[in-house]
Amino acid sequence: MAQNTETIERDKAGTQSPEPQADRQHAPLPAADRDLHRKSVNLRNPRVRMAIIIAAIVLVVALFFLWRYFSSYESTDDAQVDGHLNSVSARVSGHVEKLLVADNQYVDAGTPLIVIDPSDYQVALDRAQANYDSALATARASQVNIPITSVNTGSQLSTAQADVENARAGIAAARQHHSAALAQLAQAQANNVKAQSDVARYRLLVDKQEISQQQYEQAIAAAQADAAGVDAAKDAAAGAQDQVRQAEAKLAQAEANARAAATGPQQLAVMRARAQSAEAEVQQQKAALDQAKLNLGYTQIVAPVSGIVTNRTVEVGQNVQIGQDLMKVINLDDIWVTANFKETQLHRMAVNQPVTIHADVNGKDYKGHLQSLAGASGSITSLLPPENATGNFVKVVQRVPVKIIFDQGETRDHILRPGMSVEPKVWIR
């Protein structure tokens, strides 16, 4: 078997011609073949293979990170800076006396901007002060009268009640005196009847000379005395009757006074009502005084916020009316970004996601965060919203306003102004 193998190899070697083989080794190759030959030689080199593998890995990693980067945010160039345009208007009408600021001037909150002529409002304040002082004095007097009236009505009621009791006692005494006078009158009349009877009897006896003339005369004198006693008793009884009437009149007067004194609580209530009315008048005049002070203070118009003065339309000497817009103050410390993102960009956006805001004005990047998404697309809230209920509907990707807030201290340089263009990047992961 070994011999056969050697024989076969020699036969194969003998069939090949050595000269053409040598010619192929020394003959030049075409350029394309040479490049292919070099590449094949380089590919067979282990270092080249390793370098190619590393380059491929690096390329894949770079593409991955690029994909990760570009898919980690959503951006738009349809965005601008927004802010509050604080209007400065007049709260009182009048003549502009001073203008204390110029266009585009920075002012702090509370800085005087405009002075309206305060003369009329000073006069109104003085009048309101006088009215208030008068009402206050009246109210104080009314308060003082309340305890005085209370004491007077109480004493009057007690006195009237005592007078009523005295009058009733006087009536009782007068009636008793009248009764005694009537009794005395009856006694005097009885005595007079007896005396007149004695005179008539003594006259018969004197005529018969059964008694002396002296006894008869004594009987006549006694009869006359008894008759005078009757008249006196009648007068006393009439006087006692008059005293009863006077006592009854005094009782009626005392009862009338008592009824009048009994109205003391009502009079006290009236005084208290007057005092309350005077107090209410004080409050009313106090309100008028406060309003006059406010109106006088409104003659000096101050900046509502810190910011830049713009859109000034007032001049010295102009007559302004209540509510008239005079200028605007832009608060540069309270600005934000309104970015109109496509609706297809919103599915991964969320509140408080970090945002990088690139400003066109200075090329600077600011930090912020997503504050909120609008409740509707911009087209719906426009002046003429689209009407899609037609046969010519064409689907258009809508844009939704997104509010982006700057982080604390980012806008302290006051470079950004409302209306400037920015490009926000919302980092969604």
Image (cartoon, rainbow, N blue to C red):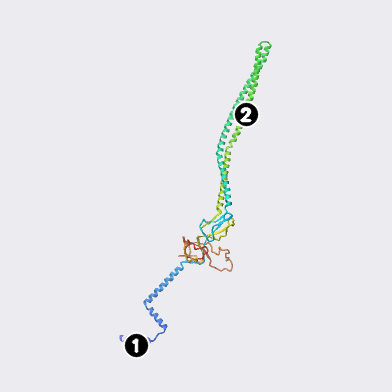
Identify the secondary structure beneath mark 1. helix
Q: Which residue matches tag 2?
A: 246
Percent x, y of residue 396 = 54, 68
* Residues packed near mark 2 inside 10 Å, few (<14), some (14 to 19) or many (20 plus): some
Q: Specify the amino acid type for callout 1.
A: Ala
Percent x, y of residue 157 = 57, 34
Vertically, is 227 above or below 315?
above
Q: Of all residues shown, which one is farthest toward the left?
A: 2
- Which residue sits at x=59%, y=28%? 170
310 or 123, nearer to the observer: 123
Q: Is residue 217 left or right of residue 339?
A: right
- Which residue sits at x=60%, y=25%? 177
181 or 119, nearer to the observer: 119
- Which residue sits at x=58%, y=52%? 119
Q: Earlier in the sequence, mark 2 or mark 1?
A: 1
Q: Is residue 135 left or right of residue 53?
A: right
Vertically, is 112 above or below 249?
below
Identify the secondary structure beneath mark 2. helix
Query: Quarter-wise, where is residue 218 in the image?
Result: top right
Q: Specify the amino acid type for callout 2.
A: Gln
Q: Which residue matches tag 1?
A: 13
Whole-number angstrom distance, CA of label 2 to CA of label 1 = 186 Å
Say which quadrant the N terminus sits in. bottom left
Query: Quarter-wise, where is residue 201 in the image?
Result: top right
Residue 423 shows up from this direction: no
* Residues packed near mark 1 inside 10 Å, few (<14), some (14 to 19) or many (20 plus): few
